[in-house]
Amino acid sequence: MQHISPTRPWSRRKPVALVRAAVGLLLLALTASGCTPQETGRPVIVVTTNILGDVVRNVVGEQAEVVTLMQPNADPHSFEISAQQAATMRSAELIVTNGLGLEEGLQQHVEGAEADNVPIFVAGDAIQAQDYSEDNGGGSAADPHFWTDPRLMVDVVDALQERVAGIDGMDPAALTTTADAYRSELTGLDAYMSSAFAAIPEERRNLVTNHHVFGYLASRFDFRIIGAVIPGGSTLASPSASDLRDLVSAIEEAKVSTIFAEASQPDRLVKALADGANLDVAVVELFTESLTAPGEGADSYLTMMRTNTERIATGLSP
């Protein structure tokens, strides 16, 4: 009898006065309602995803006002923003995006801001991106989930520091201090993950997820990606009957006993596999593409990665 047990282990800026006035009024209204940062005189950096928002805050410290567009527990592939947030983007000193096709629902706003000459920093341009292989999502599209390798996040911090240092009002010496401190934490995270994963026997280092999000982690820490319920790297895709049959066969062949689901949608994974075959596997929730609210297990990038590491190591251990 099938048994799948969900487990919770614990651009050019338009020189039109009317446009500038409209943006100013929007920002003023938002400030009064508490929806945007108060006027502090500090540069404003707008960040698309909450993972990068946390990284940027750690790098710039108190020198800049960091506005993160993506709410906790949201899907970076599909989240949307308000007109007020779009206005904030167009008045920022810098916009930080993940890039590599991740923010599918936000691209038009990023392009609009760029057309208005708002500087854009694309984190994906700071790393050596890898493509999805035929076995890990198909096609040759670049994989945007580079944050699962903390060493690549060091590359992002290096490039981000250089870009932010050029913003008027930033103190390069203070920026070096905060960026160096965060780089040290990222290096510590990488060491922690290496130690935890080293204890997993080689034959059990097999990953099955709800969609393809751990390609960089697998490359860095020598895991094998068996497959994912949702094909490709976007949660907007849907699995076919053939996809599910192939995945079930791969799970059975690799003797996988634990599969990992994004914490925001574990039920979807369970229901998708329920039609597959006689599987006896546990479903362990991970935080893969979004931070959570405080106290929910992944309220910072470092906490998210440490929590995931612990759950993967425990789920795959004998």
Image (cartoon, grey):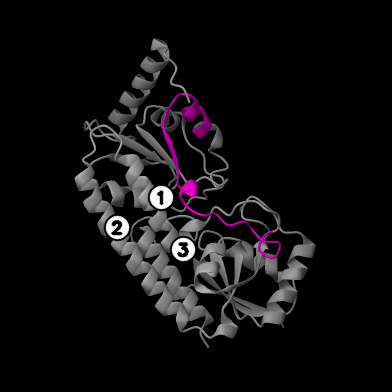
The three-letter amino acid code for the residue at tag 1 is Leu
- Asked if disc 2 and disc 3 are in contact, CB closer than 8 Å, the reply is no
Instruction: Point out which mark residue 182 bears.
Output: 2
Assess disc 2: are there few (<14), some (14-19) or many (≥20) residues with their C-alpha within 10 Å of its C-alpha: many
Element type at marker 3? Answer: loop
- Which residue is outermost to the top? 17
Label whose residue precedes the other's in the sequence (2 or 1): 1
Q: Is residue 15 magenta?
A: no
Rendered view: 80 above or below 223 = above
Question: Does 43 sit above or below residue 152?
Answer: above
228 vs 10, nearest the viewer:
228
Residue 91 point in image, percent of width and height:
37, 27
Mark 3 highlights which residue? Answer: 149
Tag 1, which secondary structure? helix
Q: Is residue 25 visible?
A: yes
Q: Residue at x 48, y 53 (%)?
A: 127
Which amino acid type is marked by label 3?
Answer: Asp
Q: Which residues are magenta?
A: 110-137
Across and down, in percent, residue 198 comes to 46, 81
Q: Is residue 79 above or below residue 211?
A: above
In the picture, the quarter occupied by the N terminus is bottom right
Q: Can the viewer see residue 292?
A: no
Viewed as shown, does residue 175 lie left or right of 277?
A: left
Q: Which residue is mark 1?
A: 52
Q: Left or right: 173 with respect to 260?
A: left
Q: How many marks?
A: 3
User: Residue 184, position in %: x, y?
Assistant: 29, 63
The answer to whether the residue labelled 2 contacts the one labelled 1, judged by CB atoms less than 8 Å apart, is no
Name the foreground residue: 315 vs 92.
92
Q: CA distance from mark 3 to mark 1?
A: 14 Å
Label 1 Cα neighbours within 10 Å, binned few <14 / some 14-19 / many ≥20: many
